[in-house]
Image: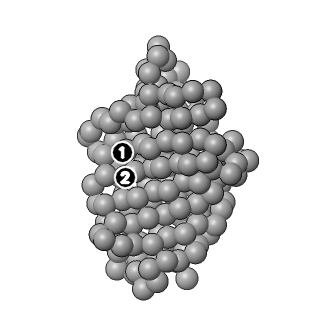
Amino acid sequence: MDFRIMNALNSTIQVKVISQIIDSSGEKTDMTLYTPATYKHEHNKAFLMYEETEVSGMEGVKTLLSYDGKVLQIKRFGHLNSLLRVEVGETYENTYKTQYGLFLMKTTGKKIKWTDSGHLNIEFHYLLEIEGDPNPPSEVHIIIEAERE
């Protein structure tokens, strides 16, 4: 994790969020989202918060990423509420609360890269298993990019 360019503790930036989900049959679902975000660094953690849009199917939901150099947390709040934890080589049980009920999910971290040296680049990969789904876990790949002013 490289936080050399952290002059502004609370920066508003435009981010590009690229996500790809590969299910157990190999079928890929791709999505690219452009949205304003708030980026800050405090107490040896980096935080990025943005609002989802109709592109992601979660319009109005806020997503907060936090990273301490080891564990990446993805918190969503609004009409969907969840907290997913991703750590390379570790499996976490997580909850995802929707209008249809509570889902239990497991995440197993494969890769986390978070760099900021004037150009913010976040990349993480994890396996996602939904309790009760007989299919093997899906692969989730996320890339977030932004030019910092």
Q: Which residue is drawn at 53% across and 48% down?
A: 76
User: Is 16 in front, or is 104?
Assistant: 104
Task: State how the image is colored.
Answer: one colour
Quarter-of-image position of residue 136? top left
Asked whether the residues under the numbered discs 1 and 2 touch, taking CB atoms below 8 Å apart as contact, a structural biologist would say yes
In the image, residue 69 sits, relative to residue 9, either above or below, namely above
Q: Mark 2 points at which residue?
A: 72
Q: Name the residue at the top extreme.
A: 134
Instruction: Please rate how many residues cluster around mark 1, counting C-alpha atoms within 10 Å: few if below 14, some from 14 to 19, many from 20.
Output: many
Across and down, in percent, residue 35 comes to 65, 62
The quadrant of the image that shows the N terminus is: bottom left
Across and down, in percent, residue 114 comes to 38, 62
For mark 2, give the secondary structure: strand
Numbered marks: total? 2
Q: Name the residue under label 1.
A: 86
In the image, residue 145 sits, relative to residue 87, either above or below, namely below
